[in-house]
């Protein structure tokens, strides 16, 4: 079994444990999480919404389009059901990560700084510093390899696809170089302004790009609404191998749907990897649990909304019933049935380009937080320079080996983080219980939020 799939099951198991430990907090407070998205707290950091937008922009990417199409091709429609399950339990994992990041963050800096490195060291004691260093070093490598190289390549390839769709007489190499340099310049313009500029950029860019994609997907689904019930029925039937049982392949079908769905769900919303708590820790919100509600919404928006819409666009299309396609090509033809092939190609290419860009911006923050923990604050300019240099190089690189390396590095980030989540789950539980006691009236020293 693939290492990434094994890791996905470990993350799912951690999410199940934390769901029980926190007494199903993500379910009982999902409505409050959705309602509270646009509320802000006072304080010296970036706003709670900016923190969430930065984290969401980092996680929304090609996994929401090509990743979903790939999950359907490999695991069948049932993979989407198990993707939902991974997200529902992942909400508890994300909540616990953010609670601990807020609880053990360094408020002496402006904006505050936190993440798994700090809650491992401060929560478990100095003896756990090697575990914190392991996370931080993996985080540096993952941001440089898995993001700077891979996401810039995705942006450049998508820009080339968009140029072809528009009928422009361009050369592939020239487009890739130009796209890489442009991505480098735009990313630099944002990240050199620090966490606050990243937050301001994310709060404007992420809602717009998500709204446009959601609107286009809903339009396509509504246009084919007669097939919607059949598509949903297929998801649930395939999840439990109902149709395959007749052919004696029910067990294998369920295993395939489960493993693919869980893996794609985990790597889409990043719950358990320890990345997004570094963005949330900079929030001006002073109540850890209130900020964790943003994380619950983050997982909900990424997987339950964005991934589900992509899946339904595909499952209600002729492209799915005819078969023979996978990945981005399957998504392209599914959207093309409603908008036309040229328009769909331009739209999806633009979407992937923008999603890749927001990932570049968000993950730069994660990488510099990890670099500062290991090497000190003076290393941040060096990290930023290296990150920006790798972006145009990534635009020209082959991605297969880099993708696999990036996934491996993300797994290495997750291992120390998951260990800390389990060991500090009691602390997260106490924070949740305290929050529930004063839910209607804010605690002293905490924002109403």
Image (cartoon, grey):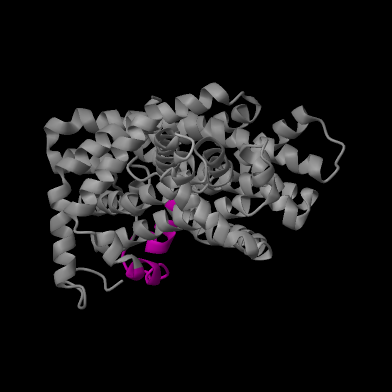
Say which residue appears at 36% left-offset and 36% top-offset: 8
Task: List the single residue furthest toward the top.
Answer: 401
Report whether 217 appears left or right of 341: left
- Could you tell me how many numbered marks the image carries? 0
Q: Please, which residue is most extreme toward the front here?
A: 246
Task: Give x and y (percent) for residue 68.
Answer: 54, 44
> Is residue 44 one of those drawn in magenta?
yes
Residue 66 lies in quadrant: top right
Q: Is residue 35 above or below residue 266?
A: below
Specify the quadrant that holds the C terminus.
bottom left
Asked if residue 141 shows in the view, the reply is: no
Residue toward you, 286 or 23: 23
Q: Where in the figure is residue 358, as x and y percent of width and height? A: 54, 48
* Residue 254 occupies quadrant: top left
- In-front residue for pair 336/179: 336
Quadrant occupied by the N terminus: top left
Name which residue lies at 71% across and 41% down.
159
Q: Residue at x 66, y 42 (%)?
A: 330
Position of residue 277 measured from the top left corner of the image (x, y, whole percent): 33, 48
Q: Which residues are magenta?
A: 31-56
Left of 445 or right of it: where is 250? right
The one of 71 and 137 positioned closer to us in this rendering: 71
Q: Is 43 covered by the magenta stretch?
A: yes
Image location (x, y in percent) of residue 15: 27, 46
Question: Seen in the image, is 300 located left or right of residue 418?
Answer: right
Residue 163 visible in rendering: yes
Q: Is residue 34 above or below residue 259?
A: below
**Residue found 16% across the figure and 73% down from its top:** 438
258 sits left or right of 96 in the view = right
């Amino acid at each position: 079994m693939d290492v990434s799939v094994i890791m996905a099951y470990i993350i799912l198991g951690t999410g199940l444990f934390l769901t029980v430990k926190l007494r199903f907090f993500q379910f009982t407070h999902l409505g409050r999480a959705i309602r509270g998205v646009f509320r802000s707290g006072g304080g010296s950091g970036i706003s709670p919404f900016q923190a969430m937008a930065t984290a969401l922009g980092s996680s929304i990417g090609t996994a929401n389009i090509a990743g979903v199409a790939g999950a359907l091709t490999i695991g069948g429609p049932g993979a989407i059901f198990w993707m939902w399950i991974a997200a529902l339990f992942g909400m508890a994992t994300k909540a616990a990560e953010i609670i601990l990041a807020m609880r053990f963050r360094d408020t002496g800096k402006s904006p505050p700084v936190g993440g798994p490195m700090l809650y491992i060291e401060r929560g478990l004691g100095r003896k756990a510093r090697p575990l914190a260093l392991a996370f931080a070093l993996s985080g540096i490598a993952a941001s440089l390899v898995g993001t700077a190289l891979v996401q810039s390549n995705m942006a450049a390839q998508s820009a080339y696809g968009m140029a072809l769709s528009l009928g422009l007489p361009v050369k592939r190499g020239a487009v890739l170089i130009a796209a890489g340099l442009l991505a480098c310049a735009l990313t630099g313009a944002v990240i050199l302004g620090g966490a606050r500029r990243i937050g301001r950029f994310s709060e404007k860019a992420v809602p717009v790009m998500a709204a446009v994609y959601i609107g286009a997907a809903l339009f396509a689904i509504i246009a084919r609404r007669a097939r919607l019930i059949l598509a949903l029925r297929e998801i649930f039937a395939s999840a439990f191998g109902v149709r395959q049982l007749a052919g004696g392949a029910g067990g294998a079908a369920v295993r395939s749907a489960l493993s693919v769905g869980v893996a794609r769900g985990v790597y889409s919303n990043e719950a358990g990897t320890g990345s997004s708590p570094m963005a949330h820790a900079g929030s001006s919100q002073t109540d850890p649990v209130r900020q964790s509600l943003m994380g619950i919404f983050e997982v909900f928006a990424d997987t339950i909304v964005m991934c589900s819409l992509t899946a339904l666009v595909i499952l209600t299309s002729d492209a799915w019933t005819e078969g023979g396609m996978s990945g981005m090509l399957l998504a392209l033809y599914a959207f093309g049935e409603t908008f036309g092939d040229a328009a769909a190609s331009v739209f999806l290419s633009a979407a992937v380009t923008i999603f890749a860009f927001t990932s570049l911006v968000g993950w730069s923050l994660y990488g510099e937080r990890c670099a500062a923990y290991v090497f000190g604050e003076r290393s941040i300019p060096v990290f930023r320079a290296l990150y920006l240099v790798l972006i145009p190089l990534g635009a020209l690189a082959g991605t297969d080996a880099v993708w696999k390396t990036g996934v491996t590095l993300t797994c290495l980030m997750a291992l120390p983080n998951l260990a800390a989540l389990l060991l500090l789950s009691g602390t997260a539980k106490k924070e949740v219980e305290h929050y529930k006691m004063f839910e209607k009236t804010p605690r002293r020293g905490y924002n109403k939020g």
